[in-house]
Image (tube, rainbow, N blue to C red):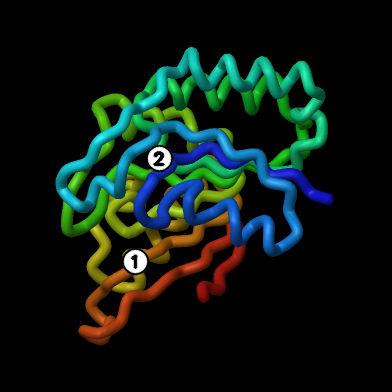
Amino acid sequence: MRFILSIQSHVAFGHVGNAAAVFPLQRLGFEVIPINTVQFSNHTGYGDWTGQVFEAAHIVDLFDGLERRGVFQNIDAVLTGYLGAPALGDAILDMIKTRLPAQALWLCDPVMGDVDRGMFARSGIPEFFKSRAMIRANIITPNQFELEYLSGVNIKTLDDAEAECYAVHTMGPYTILLTSLIHAQSDDADISMMASRKGCKKFL
């Protein structure tokens, strides 16, 4: 059985973060070890919520416990999403560098913002993703707004999206799954997705 460490948000009402990812991965046959970066009443897109962001020390404490159980040596992949605080990003990066097998993959969803909401991540988190996470991540799943932040260029056409994927590949990630893509050639009712692999000239 393959093991996935999923480090994301959790909501009591609705399905985002670990509340959305754990069950489908289990149904696919993976053993999932969920660690919640926050526990909120609901998704922040509702405008108000209750709950708390977990401190980095709390997450590191969980890492220590998992290491004592020998869990890390079996991890095949890490999935990260909403962080809540930049210190948590550094704790996750340190864990990936020092505790995981060298062959373990990191799928990083750089949750920072969206086209209709702008940047909603706390100060320091976007900088973490751009300057430190991209160098290490194997796969990233940014939405259009997040890819534009990482590359520094706005997407207006499909060619722009391709060029930005190429630019971000040079930062480190081997695979990019660009979500919620809207460009000049899009139909009004369509939202596209682009899959890009480093060194590959074909896009999906």
| Residue displayed at 73% across by 48% down | 31
Q: Picture coordinates of residue 157 (x, y %)?
A: 28, 72
From what the image shows, is residue 17 above or below residue 204? above
From what the image shows, is residue 81 above or below residue 116? above
Q: Residues within 10 Å of mark 2 (few under 14, many from 20)?
A: many
Name the residue nearer the viewer: 156 or 18.
18
Write down the residue under mark 1.
180
The total number of labels drawn is 2
Q: Picture coordinates of residue 128 (x, y %)?
A: 39, 28
Name the residue nearer the viewer: 100 or 13.
13
**Helix, strand or loop under label 1:** strand
**Helix, strand or loop under label 2:** loop
Front disc: 1 or 2: 2
| Residue displayed at 58% across by 51% down | 22
In the image, what residue type sits under mark 1? Ser
Q: Quadrant of residue 200?
A: bottom right
Of callouts 1 and 2, the N-terminal one:
2
- Whether residue 171 is visible to the viewer of this picture, yes or no, is no
| Residue displayed at 47% across by 28% down | 132
Q: Picture coordinates of residue 96 (x, y %)?
A: 64, 28
Q: Picture coordinates of residue 190 (x, y %)?
A: 30, 82
Write down the residue under mark 2.
82
Mark 1 → mark 2, Cα distance in angstroms: 17 Å
In the image, what residue type sits under mark 2? Tyr
| Residue displayed at 38% across by 75% down | 192
Q: Is residue 94 left or right of residue 32?
A: left
From what the image shows, is residue 178 above or below residue 185? above
Name the residue nearer the viewer: 81 or 31.
31
Q: Is residue 4 left or right of residue 194?
A: right
Q: Is residue 166 left or right of residue 25?
A: left
Q: Residues within 10 Å of mark 1 (few under 14, many from 20)?
A: some
Q: Is residue 129 left or right of residue 156?
A: right
